[in-house]
Image (cartoon, coloured by chain):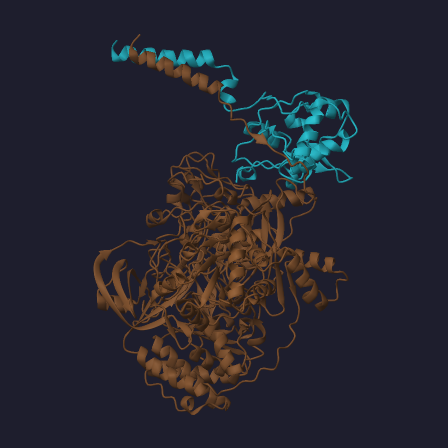
Chain colours: A cyan, B brown
Amino acid sequence: MSLRTAKIISLLVTVTGAVALWQGATFTSLGSQQGYQPAQPIDFSHKVHAGDNQIACLYCHSAAERSKVAGIPAASTCMNCHTQILKDSPEIQKITRALASNTPIEWVRIHRLPDHAAFDHSRHVSAGIKCQQCHGPVETMERVQQFDTLSMGMCVTCHRTHRAVTLDENGKPVITSEATPKRLMASTDCSVCHH
Amino acid sequence: MSRRTFIEMIGFSAAALALEGCRAPEQKIIPYLKQPVELTPGVANWYASTCGGCSAACGVLVKVRDGRPIKLEGNPEHPLSRGGLCPVAHGMIFELYDSDRLRQPLIAGKAATWDEADGQIAQKLAAIRQSGGGVRLLTKTIQSPTSLDTIAKFVSQFKDGKHVVYEAFSTGAISQSHLRTHGIAAIPSHRFDRAKLVVSFGADFLGSWLSPVEFTRAYTRARELRDGQRDIPQHVQFESRMSLTGGNAGRRIKVSAAEEIQSLLLLARLVAEKTRAAAPTALASFEPSLLSREIRLAVEGLAARVARLPGESLIVSGSNDVDVQSIVNFINQSVGGYGKTVDLNSTRTGSANSDAEMVDLVRDMNDGKIAALVTLGVNPAYDYHAAPAFIGAMAKVPLKISLNPYRDETGSLCDYSCPTHHFLEAWDDAQPARGVFSLNQPTISPLFQTRAYQESLLRWSGGQRSFYDVIRASWKEKLFPLQTSHKTFDEFWDHSLEDGVFAVDPPPVATVRFTADSLADSAARLELRSKSLSGGVVVTLYEKAAIHDGAHANNPWLHELPDPVTKITWDNYACVSPGLARKLRLEEGRVIQLTAGAATLELPVHVQPGQHDDCIAVAVGYGRTKAGKAGTGVGVNAFPLVSFYDGAFSYVTGGAAIERTSMRVEMASTQLHATLDGRPLIKEFTLAEYTSGGKAEHESEPKSIWKDYPYGDHKWGMAVDLNACTGCSACILSCQAENNVPVVGKDEVRRQREMHWIRLDRYYQGGEDDPTTAYQPVMCNQCDNASCESVCPVLATVHSSEGLNMQVYNRCVGTRYCANNCPYKVRRFNWFENRHDDPVANLALNPDVTVRTRGVMEKCTFCVQRIEEVKIKARNEGRAIRDGEIEPACQQSCPAKAITFGDLADQRSKVYRLKHDRRDYILLEDLNLRPSISYLARVRNVEEA
């Protein structure tokens, strides 16, 4: 095979390969964990807690109001109710045993941003953004999965389109998409997230 | 299909599979079982505590994120340090996570348990109690009253038990001289804020002497330029080497060591004449045989001025010669300084050290009188002037216990190593000056199997109580009754713990009476000593602002911090004057053999402008042989040049011989050009120019091809007051700790690849023989018309809507165009992957700042993570950001308060006001970069007395 033919063939192979494998998400969501739904050490159902029983997200993930991270509730938080409810269930027994033996529960992390991206839960929660906006309908999930891509595009789209949060007469934040006072706009400066 | 195509296809399918399998490795989240109420993950808690870096015991606030301390900041409530910190304090975070610290007790160098060590030590101590052998506890200066009680209790169990305090770089002569002149062995408080005239004889009080943070704060506070101020205090420095303090003096008089002594004696004589103080004849008849007419005139002028300012002048000396300090006391006494600028009521408490006791101890050890030696925080096998004699004497002590946290030179000679905690892991208290009490609380559980030395001593004294209970009991008994605002002790304790400090007016000490009896001898001895030091080269030893006596030498942050004066990192060297260098054909980096006394050292030469021709200055604290990974083998140990003279260690040795060798080394310096050469980088006024309405010039607005940015609510800016900045370099390390700035090592610094985000420039003006010195911190100027932004091909450096010049690490591909185009030269490039493979050291990283990888440019961000944090907090609370609420790391702990950050869009902000001060100027203004940083010109009081 001459060098020329070899070049043409290798180019063809590369292009056809790329087209064949191009299924939209392959490259755009490179490294994305969208749909990630690992098994957890305890069969905890968000559907039962947040959906059927209407427990507020912030009851367990209380740090989301005050901190960058939403936090995973301490085992003792579970026992606020489960010392009374379903205390004999084998899954609850795992928590009881963890507390008794002083071994913390190792949950598998689902939502994860790269180290060079800083996201602050408290700002978004107090601006009135619903948890579901990024995390999806968690209250319907038996086992939680990553709903969105959590990519930069997703953040920036929202920062650009919603643009703004205003405060209503009660001081409650309201999302509007109209022109709003500049100081309440969501910023798209790089350094807001990357520092 | 050819082999080549086959490989291509295989390669492609492998890549496609790899893309599909691009899943991050599984990560765990481990929440608490029971979450402590005060803790929210991701939110920092702050605890007030006390710095254990040196005996100055400054107040600190410890930032604790998710259970680990990551930053020390100054405690603004502390009455002495007032929110400032020094470079050493910032380095303490690194030391906490130093994996070279001992991880458990050792018996004869082998790992053991505490029970084993305690059992054996208790048995041996019991035998000594029976036999009545000598027991010595050898420590550094300890400022903690409760720890001193514990120590006293420990040594009192033995018939011949004693606590000996040893400082390798001693200031013991100050307390010894007060014993002679005022009948009290104490180091007074020096009140630089009250002095209208400071005369310092070689005391580097802004750099390393006694309590530099407190002194810097007081010194700069007295020099703040408020509107309408007509006068700023004068500072005259007599010195032979070039010190940080000398560089800040209004007037610096270059003298040899001999002339320094004679100038002091002449000043004493003239002041006595003018104030009619009774002076002994030896002083009254003193004739300054060695002083030139010029120096004599200067001293005469000073004497007149000192006499005109009763109670408002302060004389200090950095010498550790008891005679010199006695004469200093005499002058301060004659001009009414005691009770005003020199305070013997709020003395530095601690355990005043006497160098003679250390010499006695070595003699007793040699004589076999010592049955047990316990060392704590001291390392005489390295830093004692006659270290081989000490090591020999150690061999004659049957029981040797080291409480040091490292297995250092002395620790490795000991039978038992019982490592104490790092101060951030332990309970303690401190009394840095009488009436000022501060608490030291643990901010992390001990990382290793270490134990607080107080607990060890309590246990070996047969006690069962924990040291925490002892401190509480002691505060309840001694301090609680001194106040009335809290009804219960618990309330008082909680309040003190929250503030970190509790201050009362100290009860007056028994009246001290001045006696001049010893002065005749002192004056006579000093005249002889000055003559013996004249006519030859004198070696002067000094402490650097970061390394001090070498106790923290295993800290790469401290080693890589450029020395404030020489700008050299990772080394000590022989500073010689330009004149001496010419005479001996020495040039920068030439290795010389320096012989003085019984010791010979091989050191590279640093040619130091402004130094006296008869002086060679060498820093101590280097040349450790068992410091650890970072500190072993850096520099040369200069302690063998110390001598013991008149009951005190002397750091001045005459009759030095210099031999030029054929070797040359390249030192790692961060500044290669030291002069301004007419460039207006530094602007200075004399006091007269300033008071007559002097104004820093601005360029007329040049035409710009750029449009102005439309800023919104904020436009961040900074003002750096060069009149306040002393060049102490604490900001550099504060920034390093906050922003995860890596250490690159000596070789990389040599290639000008240091990573510090702040460069502290030092310039000499005037001739090299007697220059004035100016300091200027330069960090990213956050320009509006930034020259870096326009050349980045990938938009990795762009302008923010609030005036910041953002560096986006994840976009940067490392072309380095920006750094080449930056006229301030403040951008730093990661030439190599900086290793982060020490899991313990990684705990020191700030989780709010990205750790940069190889090939990425970085620079000062104005601590954008702090800006964002405050912005989020203010918005969550639905309020505006308060002026001064955002403090970048450099500003927070600046002891001189030289840096002001704020919002230039807010016309009521402090930074806006400073920006419109008449001293305001802009660095390289003619380039029209419109930086957000501006400098305030320095005003120097150069009046000739």
**Horizontal placement of B13 versus A73: left or right?**
left
**Horizontal placement of B601 versus B132: left or right?**
left
Residue sticking out furthest to the left: B662
Residue B649 position by quadrant: bottom left
Q: Quadrant of the N terminus of chain A?
A: top left
Residue sticking out furthest to the top: B1
Residue B671 position by quadrant: bottom left
Q: At x 59% / y 20%, what residue is drawn?
A: A35
**Horizontal placement of B477 versus B532: left or right?**
right
Q: Is residue B447 above or below residue A124?
A: below
Q: Which of the pair B155/A146 is nearer the observer?
A: B155
Q: Which of the pair B201/B313 is nearer the observer?
A: B201
Q: Which of the pair B797/B569 is nearer the observer?
A: B569
Question: Can you see residue A73?
Answer: no
Label tally: 0
Question: Can you see residue B504?
Answer: yes
Q: Is residue B764 above or below residue B415?
A: below
Q: Is residue B88 above or below residue B768?
A: above
**Horizontal placement of B338 versus B359: left or right?**
right
Q: Position of residue B854 (x, y in %)?
A: 41, 37
Q: At x 41% / y 16%, what residue is drawn?
A: B14
Q: Position of residue A159 (x, y in %)?
A: 61, 32
Q: Position of residue B336 (x, y in %)?
A: 55, 83
Q: Which of the pair A10/B472 is nearer the observer?
A: B472
Residue B433 position by quadrant: bottom right
